[in-house]
Every structure is written in structure tokens, then in C-alpha cells.
Amino acid sequence: MEAIIQIEKLNLYYDTYHALKNVDLDIPEKTVTAFIGPSGCGKSTLLRTLNRMNDMIPATRIEGSVRIGGTEIYGEDVHVEALRKQVGMVFQQPNPFPKSIYDNIAYGPRLHGIKSKSDLDGIVEQSLKQAALWEEVKDYLKRSALSLSGGQQQRLCIARALAVQPDILLMDEATSALDPISTLKIEELVQELKSTYTIVMVTHNMHQAARVSGQTVFFLNGEVVESASTDVLFSTPSDARTEDYISGRFG
Amino acid sequence: MERLNLGDSKRINRRRISDQTLHMIFLACTSIGILVLMALIGTIVMDGIHRLSPDLFTNYPSRIADRAGLKSPIVGTIYLLLLMAPLSFILGVGAAIFLEEYAGRSRWVRLIQLNISTLAGVPSIIYGILGLAIFVRGMNLGRSLLSGVLTMTLLVLPIIIVAAQEALRAVPKNRRDASYALGATKWQTVSKSVLPSAMPGIMTGVILALSRAIGETAPLIMIGALTYVAFLPENLLDSFTVMPIQIFNWISRPSEAFHELAASGIILLLIMLFIMNIAAVWIRNKYSKNI
């Protein structure tokens, strides 16, 4: 299977700090990949490299190659707006806009020029259904998104990201601010979405990585220590540091 | 634990006494401010209340106290406000958006920033001198309503810029991230996500700046608005007068009757300021729910 994301010899510096060291990684299409590792190991940095959210941090420097769907995303002719439409992102804290549920979902499509009411209606309904939120909110679309619970807000943010029809969905510790039941709902959602989308998630929770991902990547101090199918990585890790981490000896 | 330790009660009593003493001192500080304000309002109302009549709104200023009114100053103040508000809003918010969202943090930007904050505290008469030099003389606009509007816009601009910048800065970063992550450009993010969240704060700042402007006298005296105006300005280049100038004019006359008129003018001005401040609070409360 051809990898949709191909990372080669990627180095990233924040000013003088070497945050990612010689990362080589392939991520296959329509799978769930989990990035695990202790705080500050570079897993979120790599995630934010994939939709170029790091561009906004001053003095960030990048060397190496990141290709998505065969295109070099740090190439000169790449429009970052178009990239981010293809590569959606869900953040750690649910961050809905202080607008209605409807306007939250329609925000992205409107940015990209969809104006017709009936088109937007269709997108809103479909996105909310995909995020398993439709049944809960279909009668309250005009209500403020801030009136939803934390778990609902996060599913709204997933729906909002899906509304611009991305191919890849990045989730940056998307459940760490949620209660266990909301977390479970989002994990179930991820299982359903992986038939349509390529999902890359950063998680602090190794059980979560084991439950939902097909492939797991273990980071330490800005390096990829080990990358393997989740079953293999958790049962027979090839690197001693991976074994130490997943058995709870550090991190 | 054998017994609850109640500590050294003498020491605690001493601490309590200093606590209570300071409580009284702070209360006294507040009371002085309020008492002075009450006394001020009290004397002005006593002087001016019987002069408050519909005539005040319909009569032009006059040399005869019983016929004198505030028609042209009231209309002048309203014209000034209506022209200043959109101009200072557009310039001020535009500058704030540039500085906060686009300019970055280079040395030049910080220098400009420092200058703007300093300008917000420059005495208003300096703006009058500036207005006289640039608008009245330099651009040959004369002692006109337009000169007044432009001068006053300059005066409130730094205040509005600083207030708008603070409002923009208060918008949480994760709201910008959400917008960028959906593929928004900077302007789309600012216009659709940041500005709506910052608008209540910006509006409050603008209203407070405008309410400062309608009480200003010095810069308008400087550009020559202190004249006897017994007509309403019909275009931007007509001469004009505003309420605080007319009040100043009346107070400088010897006759007691004019002092009473001045007091009634002050009451009207205070009512206007009060309404504007209430509007600012109302806007803040109405929209802050959604932030």
C-alpha cells in the first residue's frame, strides 16, 4: 500500500532548539496512526508539521522532506490554505467558535467559497452525522456551540474539521480534556472514520493508542525510536527504550 | 492531633485590628471621591435645574440670558460625534488590526507601539495646536466643522487603537488556530473569528473615547471654534460650536444668569456622557456572554 504521508530526513529547529531529529516515517492511507512518547519528545511538533501549523511559530526552521499524496508540502508553490483544507486538525482543548452549531460547521466551507444555503445545509447535516453528533443537536442547530458539553464540543470540532472534506485528520491529544465516557465516544468515532480518512493522533494515553490505532510510533527526544504495527510494538518491541516506556518504567 | 491549636490570640487580634483599620481607610478614600462628585453635581443641579427648559434646545446662544439657548452647540456636538465616530473607528481599528495581527514584533513595531501609548496621554491642547497647523492653516480648511472633526479624530485615535489592541489580544489563541487549521487566510481569520469576539471590547473603547471627546474644549478653542454661532452648520466647512465651548463662554461672563445657563448646559452634557457610558456597559454585558 502506497503511503499517503512520507517523511524523509526531517529536521526541525525552534531557533536553536533541535526539536525533530532525522525523522523518517511513512503513514499508510486510511489507517489510524498513534504518536506516543513522553512530554516534549516532539510528537505534537511532528503532527503540526503535517498541516504547517508550525509556520506560525517564529524562527521555526525545517530541513528534509514531507510529502503528502506525493506533493512536497514545504515546496514553494504549495498554498498553505489548500494544504490545511486537505489535512484537518482537532486540538487538545475543544475550541468551537462562539457562534451557533450550524455556523461552526459552515465556517470552513464558507471560507472556501460555498455560499448556497442548500449546499451548506447538506454539509452541516452530513458532517454532524459523521461525527455522531447529529441526533443530539439536530433540533438545536441555531444554539450557541458553547452551550454543548465538553465531549459534544469536541465532536463538533471533529465535524467542523470534516466539513471541508479533508483526506487526513490530525488529532492532537483530542481526548485529554474529556471525561472517560466522552473519550470512549470519540475513540469509537475514530474507528468509524478510519474507513474514509487517514487519522494521525497524538496521545498521552498508551491504552488509547493500543485500543484505536493500527500503527504506533514511539518518540523520544525528537527522534523516532520505533515505528511498527500497534500489536507488534506493544507485544514485542524491538527497542529496549520502547519496552521501558510502554511498561511504565519512565515517561 | 491532641488539641486544636488556636495560636497566639494576642497576635491574631493585632492583625485583625490592622485589617479593620485599613478597611476604614480604604472606605474613606472611596468616600472622598464620591462626596466630591456628589457636591459637584449637587451645586450644578441647584444652579442650573430651573434653566432646564425646552427653550434651551430651541434657542440659539444670545447676549440676553433669557433668550439664550444651546441649539447650535447641541447640534454641533452631535454633528461632531456622528462624523468622528465612523472616522476614528475605521482608522483606529484598522491600525489596531495591523499592529496586533500583521505587524509582528520587530523593533520598529515596538517603537510605534510605544509612541501610540504615549500619544494617548498627550495633553489635548497639543492636538489643538496640531489641528491649527495642519487642518486650519496647512490644508486651508479654516475654522470649520471639518477641522474640528479631524482634530478630535486625531485626539481619540491613540485611545481607540490601544483599547482595540487590548480587545484583539484578549481573543484566545485557540480560536485563531481553529480558523487557520480549516484553511483560512489571515484576513478571513481576523474578520470572521477574531473581530467578532473582540467587537464588544472595541465598541466599549470607542464609546469611552468618544465620550471623552465630547467633553473636550481646549483643542477646539485652539482651532478657533470659540465664536458666537447663531446658526446650524450646513456643510463641513461651516463654522460650528460645541457644548463645552458654549459653557466655557457663559461661565466667563460676569452675569449670574449666564452662570446658571452654564450649569444647565453642564447638566445636559453630564446626561449625554451618562447615556454613552451606560451604552458602553450595556454592549459589554450583552456580548460578553458569547465570549
Image: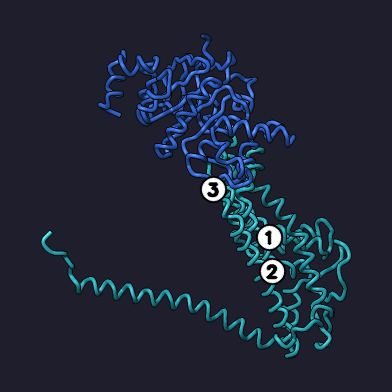
Chain colours: A blue, B cyan
Is B257 in front, or is B42?
B42
Q: Nearer the viewer, residue B141 or B94?
A: B94
Disc 1 to disc 2: CB gap under 8 Å: yes
Residue B43 lies left or right of residue A60; in this view the side is right
Could you tell me which residue is drawn at 60 percent across and 42 percent down? Answer: A101
| Disc 2 residue type (three-letter) | Glu
Provide the residue designation for mark 2. B216
Query: Residue flagged by tag 3: what amino acid is it?
Result: Ser
Which of the labelled discs sits on residue B155, or is there none? 1
The number of numbered discs placed on residues in the rendered structure image is: 3
Q: Share a chain, discs 1 and 3?
A: no
In the figure, is residue A95 to the left or right of A21? right
Residue A147: mark in rendering: 3
Q: In which quarter of the image is the N terminus of chain B?
A: bottom left
Please state the chain letter of the residue tagged with numbered disc 1 in the rendered image.
B
Whether label 1 touches label 3, CB < 8 Å: no
> Which of pointers 1 and 2 lies earlier in the amino acid sequence?
1
Please report, as a chain letter, where disc 2 is located.
B
Residue at mark 1 to residue at mark 2: CA–CA distance:
10 Å
Instruction: State the residue lying farthest toward the left.
Output: B2
The residue depicted at 57 percent of the width and 25 percent of the height is: A87
Residue B56, image x and y in percent? 79, 81
Front of the two marks 2 and 3: 3
Residue B158 location in percent, x, y? 64, 55
